[in-house]
Amino acid sequence: MLIDSGSPGAVGTIGITLTINGERRALQVAPWTTLLDLLRERLDLTGTKKGCDHGQCGACTVLVNGTRINSCLTLAVMKDGAEITTVEGLAGLAQREGKNSLHPIQEAFVEHDAFQCGYCTPGQLCSSVGLMNEGHAKTRDEIREAMSGNICRCGAYTNIVDAIEEVMHQGDAR
């Protein structure tokens, strides 16, 4: 099912198609629209946070075709045809694979109290899934290094690494 989320042919816009959290969408966007602004302001997917708006904090991390990116540094038109997963879509990934209502990393974050204020949590969750999809990090030090682009001002890093380690050892990386 294709959902049309824009006025066709609007002057100065470009037509793109994105699959966002499993839903295919046809959109008209201005060429300068970042993926972050499209998600938050046009599509009301406000789980993805605008932190620094310079790609330094990781609060805006989403998955594009399973790979983690900073959505504040990415123009929406650059991702035409891509599959985007936001924090709102993580549970849907798990459900499509026949698992519980939450993604395993979401469950592990809750179990390990891997958040405090919660502002960075959506980016941390998406980055965690991307990290596990990449398959490079095997040790706590490698996890910490691979997650270094996601800043937690409250300092929940130890609990975040604990949650990632748990899910990695369960083999539920996606």
Image (cartoon, rainbow, N blue to C red):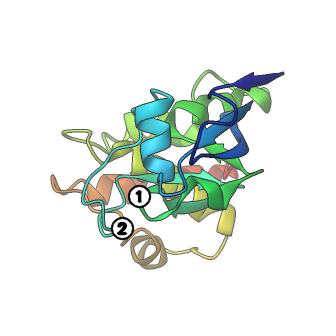
Check disc 2 and give the amino acid type. Gly
On the image, the x and y values in percent for residue 140 come to 44, 72
At label 2, counting other C-alpha atoms closer than 10 Å, the crowd grade (few under 14, some 14-19, many 20 or more) is some
In this view, the residue farthest toward the left is 154
Check disc 1 and give the amino acid type. Cys
| Label pair 2/1, CB-CB below 8 angstroms | yes
Kindly identify which numbered label has been placed on residue 55. Answer: 2
Q: Nearer the viewer, residue 148 or 25?
A: 25
Q: Nearer the viewer, residue 106 or 85?
A: 85
Q: Quadrant of the N terminus?
A: top right
- Estimate the spatial distance between the alpha carbons at disc 2 and disc 1, rounded to whole Å: 6 Å
Q: Is residue 47 left or right of residue 20?
A: left
Q: Nearer the viewer, residue 131 or 78?
A: 78
Q: Residue at x 15, y 52 (%)?
A: 154
Q: Is residue 131 left or right of residue 49?
A: right
In this view, the residue farthest toward the front is 11
